[in-house]
Amino acid sequence: METVRELIESKPVGLITVKPDVSMKEAMLLMDDKHIHSLLVYQDDRLVGIISASDYSKKVLASGLDEEATKVQDVMSRHVSTISPDATIMESMRVMAAHGFHHLPVEEGGKIVGMVSWSDIMHLMLN
């Protein structure tokens, strides 16, 4: 397996999204239920951000915010970098390492078609 496309096609879970007005508690319950660590945030069929379990710990728990009152839009990252499905796994690793990302959405033709994470890459390398 060499390309990001091959990696995302091998994943058992598809793209999981959330709306910006969902509470952080609901978002975390969804991540826990789906066994994932990030969610893409969509508003009216448009990508507006990304939220991760790390954002929850650093921006909600560490700040003592109420997880039910705090909305995804209050803590999500609004600038979302993406990678092409034709990129190599190594290229995705370089992008994530250079920017400190743990998750990287995969974009093709202006549409998000998947997500690659360090965890996905580690599982790939170990199998």
Image (cartoon, grey):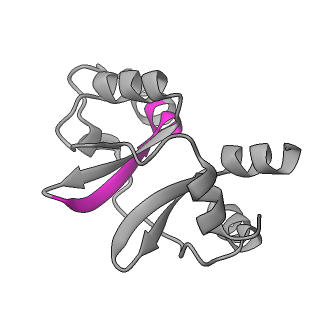
- Tell me where residue 21 appears, x and y as whole percent: 17, 38
Mark yes or no: residue 40 visible.
Answer: yes
Which residue is found at the position 47% from the left and 23% from the top?
A: 32
Is residue 62 visible from the viewing direction of this image?
A: no
The residue lying at 23 percent from left, 34 percent from top is: 71
Measured as percent of width and height from the top left, residue 121 is found at 73, 52
At x 85%, y 44%, the residue is 127
In magenta, the rendered stretch is: 45-56
Left or right, residue 108 beside residue 96: left
The residue under the point 29% across, 24% down is: 26
Q: Is residue 53 above or below residue 84?
A: above
Is residue 66 covered in magenta? no
Front residue of this view, candidates 16 and 100:
16
Residue sitting farthest toward the left: 44
Image spot of residue 8 (x, y percent): 58, 57
Judge whether residue 47 is colored magenta.
Answer: yes
Left or right: 108 with respect to 111?
A: right
Q: Position of residue 11 (x, y in %)?
A: 59, 47
Total marks shown come to 0
Residue 2 found in image quarter: bottom right
Depth check, front residue: 60 or 101: 101
Nearer to us in this view, 41 or 55 = 41
Left or right of 119 in this view: 57: left
Image quadrant containing the N terminus: bottom right
